[in-house]
Image (cartoon, rainbow, N blue to C red):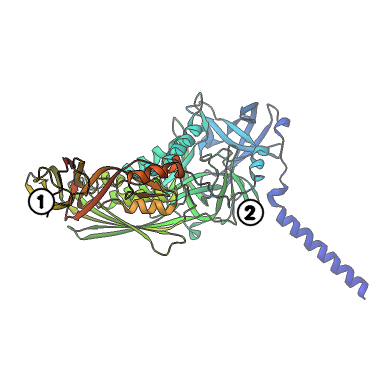
């Protein structure tokens, strides 16, 4: 009895193992064809979504194999045929469409030409794409610290290395010849209009992305297929929530948790971590220059891991860091109170620009008026590992409404300074912006400044007279006390008087993220008058701090010890800040010579 029963159990186990292996083999068992075996005249098919979520077949015929078309990468030139392709040509969003020749996976449709008269496309060979999967993920690598310029407005100057890197990156992706380019990645935008849409277009167009109107995340209840499959649509999400920005392409290959798509880079940024989502296609927009799919993302189903010449790769078991961002805009005249919530990807080169575009878009939606306006903004940033959030306040006035001010708000600029710092990986956990509007120009300008004493003595308290002109021409004079520095007779002392935005305090080049945050906090409020006094005494920068109380002999002795990278020359200065109820613009300077010390 045990013999037959034992045999049946073994057969059942073996059958279960075979079925399980077959179920898990999936696309990993897909046969591939080497580019060396591809010949002109070969016929096959491709898979892509023209509408909805189900891939459709389109016919292909090999025209030629072009060796070393890119660096150490050939392409397979194909001619495509399908009722939609025959009308619209190679369509943006087809990037990544798997191409099969003789039943074997040859690669991904990836390249096209502007204004082409027939549907010719370039195919990235599958072996080059599979090499992307073979790369080791270095996600735990940290940046190597290096010297950085002091944080000065505009805040982009604080990340000058990041801006240069961004420009070099997009220029390297953008340049092509003869109209040849990636099969465009449609950037599906939902909720973006006007200036904000144009900002995104300018930032992302050099990467081959073309902005199209789409929809926001549909969610699982709206028909989300729930997983990726060859020929299905994939979206790389940059912004989601009350507005959305998603790059749409096609999945080429799936092996367990690994996904290959596009057949070309998105940003060519190497390793990255951006959310990837399933997507649906609403329709195809045919155009003379280049047609595009109109699509919307569904839910997040993984994270981009590699962004390389031959493909992007993602893992469905990974999740990318995302920054929740809330914006509240309050109009004190109409008492309108609007709140918005979005999530923005966390990336040193992309996040500052995406935050800026989202903030401008929200501001234009909440307050599109182009009349005189005065605005106060408070921004709060929570950084992982720091118990206390960073809070910055700013204010500004504009003759053209709120939108022009968005480029100068310091709380928004702080994002680039923190996430792009070269000292450590700073994880921004959340951003909150509170904008308060008052229509009318609540601003004064410093038009003149003078002192009443001709040659004040060291330690004497004198008055600094400041003439302010309000919008409309009304003038008034305000007075501030100033203690003359204790310096030798004959020393030239300079006084700067101006609005908080017009005077920049001296700062040492930061040596850590803490220094960056400290420098940011040193800026003066826009709603203030600042009186600064400087004397020709040298300061020393030591570990991100200014030391200005040293005798000249001590400063000279420290220079050889500190090294050239730590020594910077500054005029010793002190500042007094006087809050005002309105924004103050402009500045004036006064220089006087210190007289003899008077006996008391």
Q: Nearer the viewer, residue 591 or 127?
A: 591
Q: Nearer the viewer, residue 166 or 243?
A: 166
**Is residue 209 in view from this perspective?**
no
Crowding near the residue tagged with mark 2, few <14, some 14–19, many ≥20 C-alpha atoms within 10 Å? few
Query: Residue 98 in the image: x percent, y percent?
Result: 62, 41
Image quarter of the C terminus? bottom left
**Which residue of the protein is positioned furthest toward the bottom in this rendering?**
1
Marks 2/1: CA–CA distance: 69 Å
Query: Residue 540 in the image: x percent, y percent?
Result: 37, 45
Crowding near the residue tagged with mark 1, few <14, some 14–19, many ≥20 C-alpha atoms within 10 Å? few
Q: Nearer the viewer, residue 252 or 170?
A: 170
Residue at image point 7% right, 44% down: 473
**Is residue 526 in view from this perspective?**
yes
The mark closer to the camera, 2 or 1, is: 1
Question: In the shown orientation, is residue 408 left or right of residue 460?
Answer: right
Asked which secondary structure carries label 1, the reply is: strand
Question: In the shown orientation, is residue 158 left or right of residue 139?
Answer: left
**Mark 2 — residue?**
257
**Mark 1 — residue?**
478
């Amino acid at each position: 009895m045990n013999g037959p029963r034992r045999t049946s159990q073994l057969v059942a186990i073996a059958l279960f193992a075979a079925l399980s292996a077959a179920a898990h083999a999936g696309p990993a068992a897909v046969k591939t064809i080497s580019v060396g075996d591809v010949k002109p005249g070969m016929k096959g098919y491709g898979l892509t979504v023209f509408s909805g979520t189900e891939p459709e077949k389109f016919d292909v015929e090999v025209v030629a194999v072009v060796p070393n078309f890119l660096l150490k990468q050939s392409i397979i030139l194909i001619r495509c045929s399908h009722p939609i392709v025959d009308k619209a040509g190679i369509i943006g969003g087809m990037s990544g469409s798997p191409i099969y020749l003789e039943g074997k996976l040859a690669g991904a449709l990836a390249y096209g030409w502007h204004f082409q008269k027939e549907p010719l496309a370039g195919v990235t060979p599958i072996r080059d794409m599979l090499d992307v999967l073979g790369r080791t993920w270095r996600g735990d690598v940290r940046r190597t610290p290096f010297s950085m310029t002091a944080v000065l407005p505009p805040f982009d100057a604080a990340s000058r290395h990041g801006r240069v890197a961004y420009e070099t990156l997009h220029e390297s992706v953008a340049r092509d010849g003869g109209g040849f380019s990636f099969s465009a990645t449609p950037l599906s935008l939902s909720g973006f209009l006007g200036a904000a849409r144009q900002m995104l277009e300018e930032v992302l167009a050099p990467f081959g992305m073309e902005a199209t109107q789409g929809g926001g995340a549909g969610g699982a209840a709206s028909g989300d297929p729930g997983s990726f499959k060859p020929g299905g649509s994939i979206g790389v999400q940059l912004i989601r929530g009350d507005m959305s920005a998603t790059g749409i392409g096609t999945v080429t290959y799936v092996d367990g948790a690994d996904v290959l798509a596009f057949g070309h880079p998105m940003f060519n940024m190497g390793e990255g971590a951006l959310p990837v989502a399933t997507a649906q296609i609403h329709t195809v927009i045919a155009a003379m220059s280049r047609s595009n799919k109109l699509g919307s993302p569904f839910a997040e189903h993984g994270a981009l891991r590699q962004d390389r010449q031959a493909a992007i790769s993602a893992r469905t078991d990974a999740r990318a860091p995302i920054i929740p961002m809330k914006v509240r805009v309050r109009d004190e005249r109409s008492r309108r109170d609007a709140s918005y919530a979005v999530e923005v990807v966390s990336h040193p080169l992309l996040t500052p620009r995406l935050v800026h575009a989202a903030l401008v878009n929200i501001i234009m939606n909440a307050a599109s008026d182009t009349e005189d306006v005065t605005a106060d903004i408070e921004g709060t940033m929570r950084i992982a590992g720091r118990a206390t959030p960073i809070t910055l306040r700013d204010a500004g006035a504009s003759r053209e409404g709120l939108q022009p001010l968005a480029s100068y708000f310091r709380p928004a600029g702080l994002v680039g300074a923190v996430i792009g710092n070269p000292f450590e990986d700073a994880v921004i956990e959340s951003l909150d912006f509170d904008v308060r509007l008052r229509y009318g120009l609540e601003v004064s300008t410093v038009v003149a400044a003078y002192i009443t004493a001709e040659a004040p003595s060291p330690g004497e308290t004198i008055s600094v007279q400041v003439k302010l002109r309000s919008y409309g021409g009304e003038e008034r004079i305000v007075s501030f006390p100033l203690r003359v520095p204790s310096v030798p007779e004959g020393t030239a002392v300079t006084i700067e008087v101006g609005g908080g935005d017009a005077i920049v305090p001296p700062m040492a080049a930061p040596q850590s993220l803490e220094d960056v945050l400290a420098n940011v906090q040193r800026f003066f409020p826009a709603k203030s008058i600042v009186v600064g006094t400087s004397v020709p005494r040298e300061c020393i920068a030591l570990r991100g701090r200014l030391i200005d109380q040293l005798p000249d002999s001590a400063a000279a002795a420290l220079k050889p010890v500190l090294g050239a990278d730590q020594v910077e020359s500054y005029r010793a200065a002190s500042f007094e800040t006087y809050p005002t109820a309105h924004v103050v613009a402009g500045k004036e300077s006064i220089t006087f010579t210190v007289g003899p010390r008077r006996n008391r």
